[in-house]
Amino acid sequence: MLGEGFDFSQLKLAALHDTHKSLAITLQFIGRFTRKGPKDVGDATVVTNIADPGAEKKLASLYAEGADWDLLIRRLSEERIDDELRLQNVIEQLKLNGTLAAELSLWNLRPAISAQFYRTKCKDWTPLEYAGVLPTAAETWYALDDKDRLLVAVVAQTEEVKWGDYQNVVNTLYDLVIARWEEDEGVLSIYASDYDRMRTERMAKVIAGDDVELFSGDAIFNILNGVELPLVKNLGSRRVGAISFTTYFGTNVTEGLGHIDKSEAELNNIACVGYEDGDRVLWGGAKRRGKVWQQRTSGSVADWVAWTKSTWDKVTSDDDDVKNIIKGFLKPIKLTAPHTSHAISAEWGEQAQQNQSERQAILFGKVEKLLYEVDVGIDSIEGDGTINVSFEAEDAQAVYQLKISESLPGGYAYERRSGPAVMFKRVTKEAEPLEVYLQRDPVVIRYADGTHSYNCYHIPTNLEVGVYPKDQLEAWDFTGVPLNKESIGKAGDTATIQYRAFEHVRDEYNLVFNDDGKAEAGDLVCLKDIDESTIKLTLVHCKGAIGGRVSALIDNFYFVCGQAQKCITKKHKGVERLVRDLKRREAQWTATGNTRFLKGGQRELSYFKEKARKSRVEFEVVLVQPGANADSVTVPILQLLATTELFLKKTTDASFRVIVNAGGVD
């Protein structure tokens, strides 16, 4: 109705219930009836909620259209979201000095998380001298925060194309440079999208003086201090007395670490995955170049500033003995036979877990299932320890045997034992046999001794556990519940272990979700509002008793402990991702007239998804096994529980509870 050329000067307030897909078009549309009006009516204001991820994406798209939008939009944060306020302060200060803000929006800058550090002795810095080390023909724009000593610059230069000899055909290259100086710490941090092209070592000298010193050497590897269960992805080393470097990848890193441990080689660079403060992390460092990086989603300029502060504190800690730093590294060892400890769980490999989406699927013959619908587990274990791995969706299953033997090519092989042949399918590539895909991204097997393996490589893990204290076992009354009857199901069966668990937790949580089924996060997913900045996520894992009675069988605990260790990925992927998965699973039940919600509903689920964007998550794992009581649990059971507790603590900083039966042995 309000088309082009429309004016309504008396309009003072309007609510748009059906906005345009583009925020720019929406604002232009609003301008049609706000550009003219009585003199006593102030300037038009448009309010949008930046806490809404959709609105934030639209703002980013708007900034990408041009810097003019940045001049028109003023960002406010009534809820005082820390990240938003920090970024707002940084951007507003940067806008005060320089030419960059007039060319592009500073809000959309997304530097990778990496830096070089330089020790400085200067009394003041000269940040604008950075331009003096750039190639003569380079063009540059900058933004400078004099107060917090932060420089952001974009550099444009051209180069001849490499695929032909032409005078007027060139590549235009744009680079981002960020420099930050802390006078009190005496450190200059520099980021460049291309460190060589931006000549960062020369740049540091013109900014902070010729006496700057690149922070390098073995101390760089202090980035790995505090990283639990570190596993090296790749490393580079130089033999003592030699000039050439050797790079080790995957299982070959064990050889490289061995040479370093024996002082036969020097560590030059490393990339290592592990767990820190309850999160999965990947750190990288190169001692000669003094470069440090962390693999995570690129953040804002403010995120980079905060990261450099915490990382500088890390690398300048006391311990710079490489041997001491690497002594706790996990080292793959090739198996010639199945590992002797009992396998308790199996899960998709790293690549599959990181890319679970509608773009990947599993074909059980002609039946197609999306990857996130397919669960991987231990089907059975042969007498010699050979593991039969199940791949199972709600109405499809196949079992493959993982054979390990020196006589096999590569030392291992997957052999289909039952069910249809399985294919792994990605949108952009042809489907391939599952056993071929698993060569590149192998299934991870976890064992009762706290170690894990992939294909024919075993990763020993020294968790140094004792036994789980008996006095920490919690006893619930399971009277009236068959001890081998686990699931509530769509029928809502209340005489089940899962429902008894729900009765014990429902008053404590705002939302309780029945997630029982293939590829579950837990039998029960519970969410609780702790305070303004904290959410509690609890995953409850239930398992029926073998034979439907209380006994001393450790087999009662293998599966449930495996599920507990397997669920760490749900914590690492975050509540937002978890909520998305739960909504998918609820939609499948809703289509048949059922619901998975035991307490709360879609409103509460959406609430926690939004709150998770700015909240800390307390994580708890609860095991429920009515097939044991405090008197029947044996030392091996208590050792298994202690291993699981310590594993969860190191990888997710989770609290851990174990529920057993208050009743006696039959």
Image: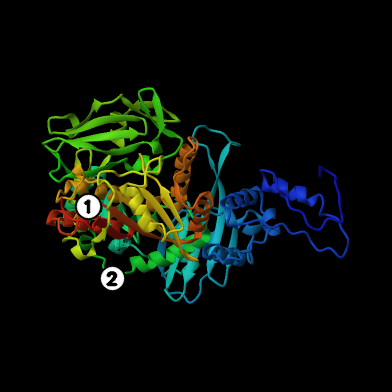
Label 2: state its secondary structure.
loop
Position of residue 506 measured from the top left corner of the image (x, y, whole percent): 41, 57
Residue 651 visible here: yes
Q: Nearer the viewer, residue 281 or 338?
A: 338
Identity of the amino acid at label 1? Leu
Residue sitting farthest toward the right = 38
Position of residue 58 measured from the top left corner of the image (x, y, whole percent): 62, 49
620 vs 566: above or below: below
Label 1: state its secondary structure.
loop
Tell me: 470 left or right of 493: left
Identity of the amino acid at label 2? Asp
Between marks 2 and 1 in the image, the one whose residue lies nearer the viewer: 1
Which of the 4 quarters of the picture holds residue 318? Answer: bottom left
Label 2, label 1: how far apart the Cα atoms are: 23 Å
Task: Please give the name of the residue rendered at 55% of the width and 60% of the height, measured from the top-left corner.
Answer: 152
Which of the 4 quarters of the picture holds residue 222? Answer: bottom left
* Quadrant of the frame with the N terminus: top right
Q: Which of 26 and 661 is in front in this view?
A: 661
Position of residue 75 measured from the top left corner of the image (x, y, whole percent): 64, 61
Position of residue 467 measured from the top left corner of the image (x, y, whole percent): 16, 60
Location of mark 2 (residue):
318
